[in-house]
Image (spheres, helix red, strand yellow):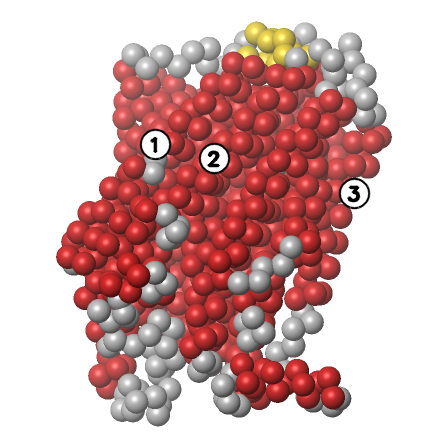
């Protein structure tokens, strides 16, 4: 018997798409504002125009403004072209994989009932008839392809926006740090809102289209929807690994030869790897991050929907309550919209010291407002009494308990964000200690940095553990899924803050390459240092939400595969556990080695150009940028396949040969060890990067004693930063996709594994 909710079904059908459209419209408005910064020199046709150009000339200390703008436009075009051509190459390879994997999904799931088109009895209510397994196979395949396409589009749009905004941020930096901050932040917001709104809208449309066929069979409908999460994450894995290898091969090559050997500044136009380095920021940190967070969002929604479909929401066909996860995301878009206005319109950044606090306020404001938003949604969208499926029994849950589940995930995200900031920002003692350790060389710097990374795991793990305990106690696996959604409910703001970092980094590179004055570079460096910290916060969010998402997917998998308990003491499960815990190490080894070997080629090429091209060091001839771009592209395309195959094939091999119990052990093991390595890797890398920036900026007395650029301490810091690059931008962020992807893949293939898996144990 369906219980009425305050929000009628029609209200839900209107509210979700309207919020998504508002998000897209807001993104377009921000983009229009950014596009007002022109990449052509100002023509002084009026008194006002004359005055404006004069103030800029004065700012530029007499450098010709026309040639500066022209150079910025040229460099921006080169970066944009490099990023676009790389992503097209990557997507061509990934597209082949996508088609092959889609066929695999259809064949495996279709074979569960021998490709029969007869109706079958439902898993959770044998008295009812559900749609055939072949239908689930077909619709899972369609949702997989849609998820993959949405993920690819999210990453590509993000990259386009970032490459559009980077030179505009540089040009605005001539007017002041506040103007540059707003351009970078607005551009980040374009990406954040487009991604959040697209993910929500596509998922909502897919659910409604599938409903036309499935009708009252909601269990089958939401089982087919899980393919959406699998598609999103599998594309994210290749985007993250491929982009990460690309960006770090170029970065390490540019830093080692340019800064350490040749003693030239970062992003110096004489450095052959400099364009590849700036392209890398966009394909790794922007396109990869976009696909990654979209994957997390899609999976947490799918996990919540699968569990809800076999709870009272699904059994009684309560449409509004069923779409509670989507309603949370819808309100999240409105909350983030309001939060963004605080940074762009209500308060303006005036000086360098206000940049980091402005970004931190975004996190606090969005979390506080979202708490109220969740309370309202829970009150209007949930029936007064309902039950949640909990491993074979229906558990009664109250509205306030479900509200607390979402809220605890949301606040755990904020805590993880702040702890990450404490360990990676050069405003606090951990990074200053790492910088100080550079006095005695690179070895002590590496030791201090590793220790910092390991230590930074403690509080985030407690925050995740508490949110798991609270949400599971109140609402079983559904509680954990909505806690993950709570953490991701402010995804638009999180992404805006995150994308701001690489845009500022690129802006600094363009300023250096265009030969702008050192004052401009100081401003872009200040933006970039804050961006490093926010990027680390973004990774913290991604890892924290991945832990909750994969646990929720694990719960859905266990329910779906009809496992009543997972007993660690049985050898089947324990071998899975210990092998699963090893997988993140194997995966990290592959990605680190890939960066190392690609960087080796890059270093050799950069050295060759410095040694053989006459006039390169003097700046009279141009380096061959294209060869370095090609080295990065070739390396990343070739090297992203083995780690990707490891993650995609492991659940299939384990499920088919060892069965669902061993697979549940593998999932638990990879989750437990993957989260720890991911947090420590990204924080270690972030801290080393900011320790180097701290020495370079020389803003405090302590920093001045370590500097200037080119000193022994600075060289030690550069080596630390170079070691940390693949940790924070390749291995660390890719691990959260590993733990989510294996869980969602196991969930999609669960019916096949339950029916035909465990071949080896059947033989013996």
Q: Residue at x 19, y 47 (%)?
A: 447
Disc number at residue 740? Answer: none
Q: Is residue 193 left or right of residue 437?
A: right
Q: Position of residue 322 (x, y in %)?
A: 70, 24
Give whichever of discs 2 and 1 has the lower sequence position: 2
Q: Secondary structure at mark 1?
A: helix
Q: Which residue is mark 3?
A: 18
Give the residue number, with chain letter if any, for mark 1: 458
Quadrant hosting residue 578: top left
Most foreground residue, 77 or 495: 495
Categorize mark 1 by other alpha carbons within 10 Å: few (<14), some (14-19), many (20+). Answer: some
Q: Quadrant location of residue 8?
A: top right
Of the two numbered discs 1 and 3 on the same chain, state the one appearing first in sequence. 3
The residue under the point 43% across, 48% down is 536
Along the line of sight, which residue is nearer the eye, 211 or 629?
A: 629
Which residue in the structure is indicated by mark 2?
A: 415
Q: Nearer the viewer, mark 1 or mark 3?
A: 1
Q: Nearer the viewer, residue 567 or 399?
A: 399
């Amino acid at each position: 018997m369906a219980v009425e909710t305050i929000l009628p079904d029609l209200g839900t059908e209107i509210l979700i798409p309207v919020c998504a459209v508002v998000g897209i419209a807001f993104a377009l408005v921000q983009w229009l504002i950014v596009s007002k910064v022109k990449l052509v020199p100002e023509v002084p046709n009026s008194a006002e125009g004359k005055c404006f150009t004069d103030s800029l000339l004065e700012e530029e200390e007499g450098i010709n403004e026309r040639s500066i703008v022209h150079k910025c436009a040229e460099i921006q075009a080169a970066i944009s072209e490099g990023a676009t051509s790389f992503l097209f190459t990557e997507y061509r390879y990934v597209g082949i994989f996508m088609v092959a994997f889609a066929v695999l999904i259809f064949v495996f799931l279709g074979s569960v009932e021998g490709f029969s088109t007869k109706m079958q009895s439902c898993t959770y209510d044998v008295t009812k008839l559900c749609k055939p397994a072949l239908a689930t196979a077909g619709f899972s395949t369609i949702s997989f392809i849609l998820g993959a396409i949405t993920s690819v589009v999210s990453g590509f749009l993000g990259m386009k926006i970032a490459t559009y905004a980077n030179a505009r941020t540089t040009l605005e930096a001539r007017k002041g740090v506040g103007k540059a901050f707003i351009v970078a932040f607005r551009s980040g917001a374009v990406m954040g809102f487009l991604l959040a709104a697209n993910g929500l809208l596509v998922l909502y449309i897919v659910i409604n289209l599938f409903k036309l066929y499935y009708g009252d069979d909601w269990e089958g409908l939401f089982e087919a929807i899980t393919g959406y999460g699998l598609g999103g994450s599998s594309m994210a894995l290749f985007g993250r690994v491929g982009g990460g290898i690309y960006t770090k091969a170029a970065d390490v090559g540019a830093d080692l030869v340019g800064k350490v050997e040749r003693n030239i500044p970062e992003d110096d136009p004489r450095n052959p790897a400099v364009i590849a380095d700036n392209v890398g920021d966009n394909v790794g940190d922007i396109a990869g991050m976009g696909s990654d967070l979209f994957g997390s969002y899609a999976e947490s929604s799918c996990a919540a929907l699968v569990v809800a479909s076999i709870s009272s929401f699904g059994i009684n066909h309560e449409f509004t309550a069923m779409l509670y996860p989507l309603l949370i995301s819808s309100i999240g878009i409105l909350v983030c919209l309001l939060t963004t206005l605080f940074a762009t319109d209500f308060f303006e950044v005036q000086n360098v010291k206000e940049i980091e606090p402005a970004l931190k306020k975004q996190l606090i404001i969005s979390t506080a407002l979202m708490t109220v938003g969740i309370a309202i949604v829970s009150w209007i969208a949930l029936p007064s009494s309902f039950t949640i499926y909990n491993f074979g029994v229906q558990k009664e849950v109250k509205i306030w308990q479900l509200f607390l589940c979402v809220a605890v995930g949301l606040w755990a995200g904020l805590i993880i964000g702040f702890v990450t900031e404490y360990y990676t920002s050069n405003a606090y003692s951990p990074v200053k200690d790492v910088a100080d350790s550079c006095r005695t060389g690179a070895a002590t710097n590496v030791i201090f940095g590793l220790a910092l990374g390991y230590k930074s795991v403690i509080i985030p793990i407690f925050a995740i553990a508490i949110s798991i305990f609270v949400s599971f106690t109140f609402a079983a696996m559904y509680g954990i899924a909505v806690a993950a959604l709570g953490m991701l409910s402010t995804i638009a703001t999180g992404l805006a803050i995150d994308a701001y970092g690489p845009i500022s980094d690129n802006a600094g590179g363009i300023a250096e390459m265009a030969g702008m004055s050192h004052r401009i570079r100081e401003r872009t460096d200040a933006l970039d240092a804050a961006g490093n910290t926010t990027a680390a916060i973004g990774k913290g969010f991604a890892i924290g939400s991945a832990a909750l998402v994969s646990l929720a997917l694990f719960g859905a998998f266990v329910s779906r595969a009809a496992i009543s308990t997972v007993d660690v003491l049985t050898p089947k499960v324990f071998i899975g556990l210990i092998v699963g815990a090893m997988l993140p190490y194997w995966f990290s080894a592959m990605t680190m080695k890939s960066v190392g070997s690609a960087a080796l080629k890059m270093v050799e090429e950069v050295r060759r150009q410095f040694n053989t091209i006459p006039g390169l060091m003097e700046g009279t001839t141009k380096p061959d940028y294209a060869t370095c771009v090609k080295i990065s592209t070739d390396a990343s395309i070739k090297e992203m396949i083995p780690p990707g195959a490891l993650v995609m094939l492991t659940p299939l091999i384990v499920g088919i040969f060892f069965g669902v119990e061993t697979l549940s052990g593998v999932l638990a093991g990879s989750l437990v060890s993957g989260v720890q390595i991911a947090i420590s890797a990204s924080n270690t890398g972030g801290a080393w990067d900011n320790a180097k920036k701290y020495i370079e900026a020389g803003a405090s007395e302590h920093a001045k004693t370590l500097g200037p650029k080119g000193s022994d301490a600075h060289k030690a810091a550069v080596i630390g930063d170079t070691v940390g690059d693949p940790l924070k931008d390749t291995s660390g962020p890719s691990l959260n996709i590993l733990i989510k992807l294996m869980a969602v893949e196991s969930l999609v293939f669960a019916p096949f594994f339950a029916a035909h898996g465990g071949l080896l144990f059947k033989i013996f």
